[in-house]
Image (cartoon, rainbow, N blue to C red):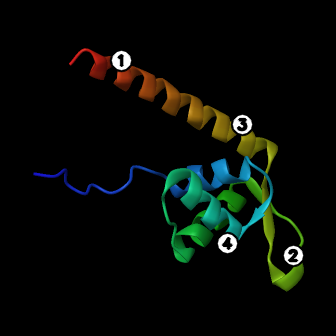
Amino acid sequence: MGLPDLGRFSDPSILILSSLAGGTKHGYAIMEDVESIAHVRLGTGTLYGAIARLEEHGLIEALPAEGRGRRPYRLTAAGIAFLREQLTGMEALATLGLRRLATL
């Protein structure tokens, strides 16, 4: 019997911030990068809804549109600090979980 499909345990906002930690990107490039690094395909509604919330909270900022009207985004200082805090917490949880699994 196979494992149930419980979906991915991932937050679109963290995935988007992690993508932008690699450099400035427009929406489609973020979507492609997230898929390559996390094997998660964000739908356009999910992507742009999360981008709007991240921008609203000052964690990312839009830059002037490039060719073909594509608008790139980049992390702000607050976004960098927030992402670092979130990933550090995830790292601590992963370390603890792996340590506990090792005892089984």
Instruction: Say which element carries label 4.
Output: helix
In the rendered image, the residue lying farthest to the bottom is 68
Q: Which residue is depicted at the point 16% across and 52% down?
A: 2
In the displayed structure image, the side of residue 5 where residue 28 appears, left or right: right
Q: Are marks 4 and 3 in contact (CB under 8 Å)?
A: no
Mark 3 surroundings: few (<14), some (14-19) or many (≥20) residues within 10 A: few
Q: Farthest residue in the top direction?
A: 103
Give the SS element for disc 2: loop
First-in-chain label (4 vs 1): 4
Q: Amino acid at mark 4?
A: Tyr
The Cα atoms of the two marked residues, 3 and 2, are separated by 26 Å
Q: Residue at x 90, y 71 (%)?
A: 64
Picture disc at residue 99: 1
Tell me how far mark 4 sits from mark 3, CA to CA: 24 Å
- What is the x, y in percent for residue 53? 63, 62
Q: Residues within 10 Å of mark 1 (few under 14, many from 20)?
A: few
Sequence-wise, the earlier of marks 3 and 2 is: 2
Of the residues shown, which amino acid type is indicated by label 3? Ala
Work out whether 25 lies above or below 23.
below
Ranked by sequence position, the earlier of labels 4 and 2 is: 4
Using residue 51 as the reference point, say whether residue 8 is left or right of it. Answer: left
Q: Which is more N-terminal, label 3 or label 4? A: 4
Q: CA distance from mark 4 to mark 1?
A: 38 Å
Residue bearing mark 4: 28
Question: Residue 51 occupies which quadrant of the picture?
Answer: bottom right
Q: Could you tell me how far apart the alpha carbons at marks 4 and 2 are, in whole angstroms?
A: 13 Å
Q: Residues within 10 Å of mark 4 (few under 14, many from 20)?
A: some
Q: Is residue 62 visible?
A: yes
The circle drawn on residue 81 is 3
Residue under label 2: 65
Numbered disc total: 4
Front of the two marks 1 and 2: 1
